[in-house]
Image: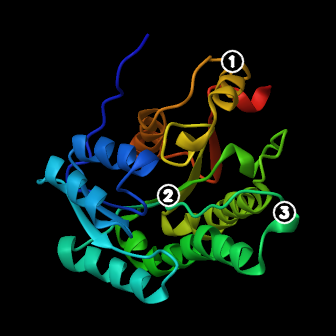
Amino acid sequence: MTGKASFDYTGHVVLITGGGAGIGAGIAQAFAEANAQVVITGRRLEPMERMAAAFPDHISYVQMDVGSSDDRHRTVETVISRHGRLDILINNALSITSGPFEERSEAEVATMFANMLQAPAELIRQSIPHLKASRGSVINVSSIAGHAVITPSRGLAVYAAAKAGINHLTRYLALELGQAGIRFNNVAPGMTDSEATSRLSAEGRAEIIRDTPLGRFGVPSDIATVALFLGSNAAGWVTGQTIDTSGGWSLA
């Protein structure tokens, strides 16, 4: 059985970091098609302008460097000023350099942790009052690397450690803020078509497909459908979970 799941997000406001391209754009499109008001963020204007032009009634954007405290505060304030509420925060923005751990500079390690662990944590903290008011939810885009050790490591040690931190932050916040009506969950993609994975060699891509039980790369809509479910009332009894969306790759 195939086909899109049907969700209606009319009246809901969704903030998606890194929403101009790749997985973030796929999630933004899915929520826009489900009638949500979606605010996407990113450093590059052009891809966000394309998304807003494609869905002018549902998608707007805020230029933001997720690593900037000022930008994060301004973004949350803009969402509330623009729409009056926030129902779902989706932390998706990616900051990654790969390579042997011993060759990573101190600055590279610090930047990756700042952008992929500290920044999502701070956005969550800043959004809590608004999410309490809406009894909303947080969906963090994690990675299978956050709970499975990839062999070979592909130089992803720092990235994987940051994603593992997000997974555990999600569990603790689900416990801490459940009484406030806020749900916290992760979606953990495997290899998914995006700008980051486009740099893989044909041989590397073929190897990953061979190791994936469902026999293909993921596409952004695979991740978006799970995000739609996690943000909906259908997942109203789901919190503190990390949903593997890797086509079974992590089983191999």
Mark 1 neighbour density, 10 Å: few (under 14) some (14–19) many (20 or more): some
Residue in the picture at 40% in, 83% down: 71
What is the quadrant of residue 129 in the picture? bottom left
Q: Is residue 163 above or below residue 176?
A: above
Mark nearer the N terminus (2 vs 3): 2
Q: Is residue 97 above or below residue 80?
A: above
Secondary structure of the residue carrying numbered label 1: loop
Label 2, on which residue?
92
Contact flag, marks 2 and 1 (Cβ < 8 Å): no
Label 1, on which residue?
213
Mark nearer the N terminus (3 vs 1): 3
Q: Amino acid at mark 1?
A: Pro
Q: Residue furthest bottom?
A: 70
Q: Residue furthest left?
A: 57
What is the quadrant of residue 225 in the picture? top left
Kindly report the distance in space between the C-alpha atoms of the residues bearing marks 3 and 1: 29 Å
Contact flag, marks 3 and 1 (Cβ < 8 Å): no
